[in-house]
Image (tube, rainbow, N blue to C red):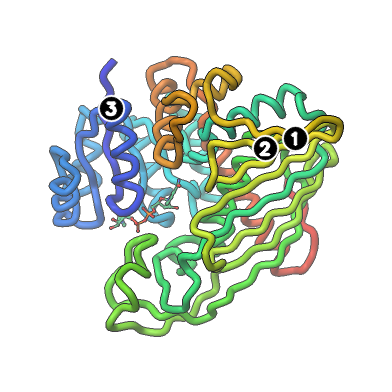
Amino acid sequence: MSIGAAIIGAGFMGPAHLEALRRLNIDVRGILDITPEKSLEAAARMGLRQGYPDLEALLADDAVQAVHVTSPNRWHHGHVLACLAAGKHVLCEKPLSMNSTQSAELVAKAASTDRVCAVNYNMRFYPLCLEARERVRSGQIGLVHAIQGSYVQDWLLFPTDYNWRVLAEEGGSLRAVADIGTHWLDLVHSITGLEVAGVFAELTTVHKTRLRPTGEVETFKSKESGAPAATEPIAITTDDIGAILFRFRGGATGVLWVSQVTAGRKNRLTFEISGASNALFWDSESPNALWIGSRTAPNQVLVKDPSLLGDLARTSVGYPGGHDEGYPDSFKHSFKAFYAAVRGDAGGPYATFEDGHREVVLCEAIQRSAATGQWVSVA
Ligand SMILES: NC(=O)c1ccc[n+]([C@@H]2O[C@H](COP(=O)([O-])OP(=O)(O)OC[C@H]3O[C@@H](n4cnc5c(N)ncnc54)[C@H](O)[C@@H]3O)[C@@H](O)[C@H]2O)c1
């Protein structure tokens, strides 16, 4: 069955989605950006048939069955609702919405349609993350008793670094934790199936004032062009750093360190999951290796090679061993799982709106804990 798709948002993520969709032979019919002119410019730049003048035009395109929402966070809720009302399948970027009221509404809407609704928590689809999932969930490392990890970047290190994400009204009142911490929360949940029972958090805003360029700056591009010529000071309330303790249901404990201001760490997610018999460690900047720790035998490093992986991880491998796969491949496999579900086939474990909602609820608990200095229970 041939499926047509469209993309909303032509910044960092729009082209990343397009590239993965092209690798999957999904027919991307067109793109919508913030103005008709920007939509047309993006369509020309990305080699697409149409730059839609507005959302109504996109939704009226009968050749489009699925919409990828890659607009900034504050638009997700409205864009997703409009797409579902028009009968489209939806794959929304993370975080699903600005708050849990919105995400709960989206979960309810999703449940009331037969459309496939997914959130692009793409980290799940690194082959060795799926391998970790299979091993942990089948009991190969024993009962999980501890999880530690981090997600660390440096692109907002300087007070001159600016992007819409630093503004609470654009990205949400949590930033580092919602923007990248939720990738870790989703990944750890995907691997272990463990639910968080309580959180204790400390959040830090290193730069309480940032210099906003009078023109917008693209994601991750702020330092390429150097300090912008004209800026205005702007007060910042969102977090640059988060330190979070977790109690998981069933007794496991955990800790997450999130930072967007750590020099030299470009985009590094790590997890270490300790079970009764083994531990697993993975680093997104070396994604083709999974460390397997043992007490009674030499430790091992499993390299991504389909002949050495379990059935689940093999579904996310596109190349033989020794041919590294990385970030763009995780998008391809996330979308492959989504479109399998759109076709009515058994898809891989893509993140659902329930998963997206869970991460938003956790963000709110983390924020409450940081504000009160207390443990906060998660219902
Ligand atoms: N899964 C991942 O690894 C990953 C990575 C980066 C960003 N993201 C998510 O993707 C989303 C977009 O982030 P980005 O980094 O691409 O941002 P960006 O600023 O680079 O791009 C956003 C684009 O959306 C356009 N836009 C703004 N308002 C719009 C509207 N109302 N309608 C249509 N287009 C509109 C902007 O003009 C811009 O072209 C965010 O939700 C972010 O959290 C996910």
Indicate which label's residue lies in the foreground, 3 or 1. Answer: 1
- How far apart marks 3 and 2 lie (CA) works out to 35 Å
Q: Which element carries disc 2, helix, strand or loop?
A: strand
Residue at 57% across / 21% down in the picture? 312
From the viewer's perspective, tell me whether residue 282 is left or right of residue 95: right
- How far apart marks 1 and 2 lie (CA) works out to 7 Å
| Amino acid at pointer 3 | Ile
Residue at 48% across / 30% down in the picture? 322
Instruction: Judge the density around disc 2: few (<14), some (14-19), many (≥20) Cα neighbours within 10 Å.
Output: some
Instruction: Return the mark for residue 291.
Output: 2
Indicate which label's residue lies in the foreground, 1 or 2. Answer: 1
Q: Earlier in the sequence, mark 1 or mark 2?
A: 2
Residue 93 is drawn in which quadrant?
top left
Vertical side of 344 occupied by 88: above or below: below
Residue 114 is drawn in which quadrant?
top left
Residue 226: give x, y in percent of width and height. 33, 75
Residue at 31% across / 33% down in the picture? 21
Instruction: Return the mark for residue 162.
Output: none
Pointer 1 residue: 299
Q: Nearer the viewer, residue 233 or 379?
A: 233
Indicate which label's residue lies in the foreground, 3 or 2. Answer: 2
Pointer 3 residue: 26
- How far apart marks 3 and 1 lie (CA) works out to 42 Å
Q: Earlier in the sequence, mark 3 or mark 1?
A: 3
Vertical side of 6 occupied by 237: above or below: below
Q: Earlier in the sequence, mark 3 or mark 2?
A: 3
> Contact (CB < 8 A) between labels 3 and 2?
no
| Amino acid at pointer 2 | Trp
From the viewer's perspective, tell me whether residue 234 is left or right of residue 9: right
